[in-house]
Amino acid sequence: MEERSTRYYETGSFKAGVIGGSKPKVATPPVVDAIANYKRENPTMFAWEIRDRLLAEGICSQDNVPSVSSINRWK
């Protein structure tokens, strides 16, 4: 019974599941290529502008767009 109450305390649920884990990888080749193209076109472009453009051009959706910090790592 102790294990069940610990699970509830950690997750808010008694259901089995994984705690933590990693997010799906968003650095797919089309995304990385698009970021590289944006930087070639405009080297002073901010990461948040790149993020907005990825969304506007449909390269990414709200669910899989990279974070600003991820974009900064790729620049």
Image (cartoon, grey):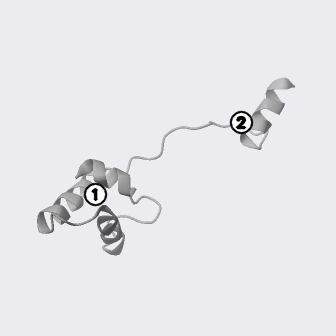
Residue hosting label 2: 16
- Looking at this view, name the residue that lies furthest to the right: 1
Q: Is residue 61 left or right of residue 12?
A: left
Q: Residue type at mark 1: give it.
A: Val
Q: Position of residue 11 (x, y in %)?
A: 72, 41
The quarter of the rendered structure image containing the N terminus is top right
> Could you classify mark 2 by the number of other residues whose Cα lies within 10 Å: few (under 14), some (14-19), or many (20 or more)?
few
Q: Which mark is residue 22?
A: none
Residue hosting label 1: 31
Q: Which one is earlier in the sequence, the residue at label 1 or at label 2?
A: 2
Q: Disc 1 vs disc 2: Cβ atoms closer than 8 Å? A: no
In terms of secondary structure, where does tag 2 sit?
loop
In terms of secondary structure, where does tag 1 sit?
helix
Cα separation between marks 1 and 2: 34 Å
Corner quadrant of residue 68: bottom left
Q: Residue type at mark 2: give it.
A: Ala
